[in-house]
Image: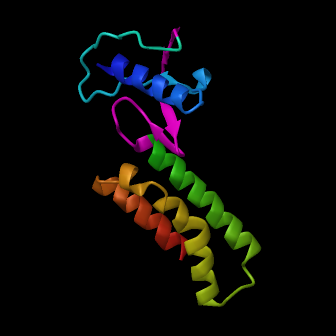
Amino acid sequence: ILQQDISSLQKWAERNKMRFHLDKCKVLNCKLSNKASSNFEYYLYDTKLDYTNNEKDLGVQVVPSLKWNAQHKKLLNKASQKIGLLRRNCSFNRNTNQRKILFLAIIRSQFEHCSQIWRPVHKTNIDKFEAMQKRAV
């Protein structure tokens, strides 16, 4: 069934005079259980697509288990770096409104990017994000 969908996408691209970049097309086998699954072979333009263990899409790291711990860690590290940058370069600014605008533009925007997908649901991860935001303010 998935091969049919891939073939349909290929035909659509050809009708619209486009072509998929084969080096960027990969197969990510998402599953919620640890059971071994058979790896089917999928083809695009008569080329076998490679399997991958993780893939970055729109800046979000996706893994087969659909757990977002790596994404959370990456975002928290990035936010920590940006907080340090703001503290070093804007330490002279005591205006709270301007600091709030900087926080919203530089740090919180990172947390809101695709948050519908990776949002933290466990209390420990939520606490980490809240602590980071408190540290920034």
Question: Which segment is the magenta one?
Answer: 46-69
Rendered residue at 61%/22% (across/down): 23
Residue 66, given in percent of the width and then of the height, sits at 34, 36
Rendered residue at 61%/26% (across/down): 21
Q: Name which quarter of the figure residue 96 lies in.
A: bottom right
The answer to whether any part of residue 53 appears in the image is no
Q: Is residue 54 above or below residue 59?
A: above
Residue 35, given in percent of the width and then of the height, sits at 24, 17
Q: For the N terminus, which image quadrant?
A: top left
Q: Is residue 120 left or right of residue 20?
A: left
Residue 132, given in percent of the width and then of the height, sits at 49, 64
Q: Is residue 36 above or below residue 84?
A: above
The answer to whether any part of residue 8 appears in the image is yes
Rendered residue at 26%/21% (across/down): 34
For the residue pair 18 and 78, the one nearer the viewer reads as: 18
Residue 129, given in percent of the width and then of the height, sits at 43, 61
Q: Name which quarter of the figure residue 7 lies in.
A: top left
